[in-house]
Each structure stands twice: as C-alpha cells, then as structure tokens.
Image (cartoon, rainbow, N blue to C red):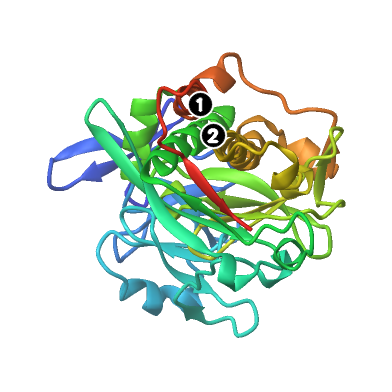
C-alpha cells in the first residue's frame, strides 16, 4: 500500500536499484501507516494523513519536515538532514549546519561562544589548546579552553589570574575528558570501549545528552559533541547550579554547535601559594595537583552525576562506574607521581597569580 509492504508487522519498501524489498527500521511511536510520497520520501502518517515522521537519508526516523521548510530542506547539501523537533540541520557527520532561531522562526548558522557571560570569566585569563586521544590507531583531537572568573583575578589575596596547560597536561586532560564522554554515552547505549567510542566520535555518532538548567531553572536535555571541545571556568562561587555535599559544585551550558561550557567553584579551595612551602619545586607540584582536581570536576559531572541529581540541583556524592577513576585519571596520576617523586620536572599545568 502506497509503496510499502507489511509482513508480520515488519514494514518493507522496494529498492529499485537493488531490485529487492528492504526492511524499514522500527518506528517506536504512534502512527496510522507508512507511505512513500510522490517525491520518493518515506513518511509515517497520522489518522488525518498528515506527515508526522520521516525516514532520513541515514535511515533514521525523525520528525517530518513541516511544509513551510520543504523548499529550504531541498536545498541542503547532500547527506544533510533537518531535525524539526530539535530545530537543527546536521550534515552527514552530525555537525550542526543551521539552527532555527526561536525569535524569528528562520534558519541561520549556529553561534559558538567561548564562555557564557553569566560565568563571569575574565577575558585576560583565557588559555586555549588542544589535546589528542589515540587508541588502536584511532585518534580524536578536542579543543580545550581554560578561564578564571573575575572574582578570582580581582582578589588581593589568593589571587589566580590564569591557568595554562603544557603539552603533557593537555594530552592527559584529553584522556580524562574523553573517558568522561564515553561513560555518559554508555549510560544510555550499549557499553563501548574507548577505541570504539573514539571511532563513533570521529564519525559524528558519539554525541551525548546532558541535562542543562536554564536561566529560569527549567531542566532540558541537550546534545553535546565532544569534537567541539570543553571550556572550563574556575571560580570560587559558593552557590553553584548543582552542588555536592562536599561543597564542590558546577554548572554547564551548551552552545549551538554542541560545545559544552563548564564552570566549577574548585578554585575557592585553593589556598595562598605562599603558605605551602618555601621550596618553589614543592609549590609547583601542589599547583599541578590543584589544577588536576579542578579539571576533574568536569569529568565527575559528565561521567558520574546522574540526570536526576542535576534536576534536583545537588547530590550527596558522585556515582563513579567501577574502575573509572583509575583508568580515566591514569595519565594525570602517572605524570604527577613522577613529578612529585623527582623523576621528572615536566609540569602539566602552570598557575599564574
């Protein structure tokens, strides 16, 4: 019927090129029937024959493109898909090409941001770099940006003006954060290894969903793309959007390209460098440990903080997967042990005051 056959509840469509019937993916939603339109699209219809779902070029069901956007959708590059429900247009590798502007109801190019204005980051504190994770011949490089809030850079005591990463620090941090993305991915998908996950990320299939609290406190799920990188703002705000019983807290937002913007109050636990030790070497080791702890807050939020904790604006403690801490922090820990033991003088991070 309408180009679609149904056999034992399974839908089939005839593939002209292969000259054979091909099974359609299951559509787990309410619909009346599936049909092939005059222009060759495969759609699911409701009882009034209105299109409610459409099969994308990638073979996935999505909300049907409303009629007013059909012409726009027809002009998209080959392999691109319009997700009306999300208000996004993706290319064949799931990069965001266009977003639907909430005010104008028009499609426009996505906007990327370094940090939201609400984070209060001092622009003079920004440090940008990249880190690469490679396993079994598959490698993914992610951008990383560190920033310090104005309440830290403006202090008269315990001032912190900038945090920098060495090449060693960037590599170890990328390892930590990619594991965090993988663990969040595994929360809603069959468990994959790091090598398998890197391959998914490379193909644009490794996106993860996180719960974000809007300015009004309303929680919503948003997709994060590891390829867009991570930005971390370190400050000393006592009341963060999500708090742990330890006094640590965090907040995050996601820009229109899928990049995650993270803030932590870990810096409020960092004491005056002069009170540590008169030995410059010992102070630098403590600095490296401090920064490691600050960057690990993002890993904790992504890998070990359930959605419900975020909706509730707090948790007693993170819920780490078995063995996660040792594996994800392996490169950071090994480098810090070597630095602290005097086997290496190569620092991971440089703290400026």
Instruction: Please name whichever residue, 140 or 54, is drawn nearer the observer in this view of the structure.
Output: 140
Q: In which image quadrant can residue 289 be found? A: top right
For label 1, the SS is helix
Circles 2 and 1 in contact, beta carbons < 8 Å: yes
Name the quadrant of the C terminus. bottom right
Q: Earlier in the sequence, mark 2 or mark 1?
A: 2
Give residue 340's mark.
none
The image shows residue 288 at horizontal and vertical percentages of 56, 38
> Can I make out residue 56 in this image?
yes
Seen at 47% across and 39% down, the residue is: 173
Whole-percent x, y for residue 334 in the image = 46, 22
Q: Residue at x 75, y 47 (%)?
A: 272
Along the viewing direction, whichever of 167 and 344 lies nearer the viewer = 344
Q: Which residue is at the front of the view, 64 or 277?
A: 277
Residue behind mark 1: 328
Please state the total of marks drawn on the protein image. 2
> Is residue 190 among what the camera can see?
no
Determine the residue positioned at 79% across, 37% down.
309
* Residue at 34%, 60% in the rendered image: 91
| Left or right position of 34 against 151 | left
The x, y position of residue 155, in whole percent, is 78, 64
Residue underneath mark 2: 180
Identify the secondary structure beneath mark 2. helix
Label 1, residues with CA under 10 Å away: few <14, some 14-19, many ≥20: many
Find the distance from the CA under tag 2 to the CA under tag 1. 8 Å
Position of 6 relative to 232 (above/below): above
Q: Position of residue 92 (x, y in %)?
A: 31, 55
Of the two numbered discs 2 and 1 in the rendering, the one whose residue sits closer to the viewer: 1
Give the residue furthest to the bottom.
Answer: 104
Q: Which residue, as the protein is rendered here, is positioned at the far front?
A: 278
In the image, residue 34 sits, relative to residue 113, either above or below, namely: above
């Amino acid at each position: 019927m309408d180009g679609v056959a149904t056999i034992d509840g399974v839908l089939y469509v005839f593939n002209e090129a292969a000259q054979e019937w091909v099974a359609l993916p299951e559509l787990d939603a309410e619909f009346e029937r599936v049909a092939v339109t005059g222009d060759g699209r495969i759609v699911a219809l409701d009882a009034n024959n209105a299109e409610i779902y459409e099969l994308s070029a990638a073979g996935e069901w999505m909300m049907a493109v409303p009629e007013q956007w059909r012409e726009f959708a027809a002009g998209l590059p080959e392999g691109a898909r319009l997700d009306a429900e999300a208000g996004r247009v993706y290319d064949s590798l799931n990069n965001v090409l266009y977003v639907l502007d909430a005010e104008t109801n028009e499609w426009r190019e996505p906007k990327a941001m370094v940090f939201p204005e609400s984070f209060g980051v001092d622009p003079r504190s920004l440090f940008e770099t990249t880190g690469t994770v490679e396993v079994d011949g598959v490698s993914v490089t992610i951008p990383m940006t560190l920033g310090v809030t104005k309440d830290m850079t403006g202090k008269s005591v315990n001032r912190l003006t900038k945090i920098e990463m060495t090449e060693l620090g960037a590599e170890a941090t990328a390892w930590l954060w990619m594991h965090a993305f993988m663990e969040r991915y595994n929360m809603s998908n069959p468990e994959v290894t790091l090598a398998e996950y890197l391959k998914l990320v490379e193909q644009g299939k490794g996106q993860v969903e996180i719960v974000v609290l809007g300015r009004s406190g309303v929680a919503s799920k948003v997709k994060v793309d590891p390829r867009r990188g991570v930005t971390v703002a370190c400050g000393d705000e006592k009341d963060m959007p999500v708090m742990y019983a330890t006094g640590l807290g965090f907040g995050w937002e996601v820009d229109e390209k899928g990049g995650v913007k993270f803030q932590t109050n870990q810096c409020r636990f960092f004491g005056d460098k002069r009170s540590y030790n008169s030995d410059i070497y010992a102070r630098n080791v403590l600095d490296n440990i401090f920064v490691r702890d600050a960057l690990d807050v993002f890993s904790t939020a992504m890998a070990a903080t359930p959605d419900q904790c975020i909706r509730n604006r707090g948790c007693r403690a993170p819920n780490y997967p078995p063995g996660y801490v040792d594996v994800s922090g392996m490169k950071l820990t090994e480098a810090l042990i070597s630095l602290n033991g005097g086997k290496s003088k190569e620092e991971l991070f440089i703290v400026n005051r």
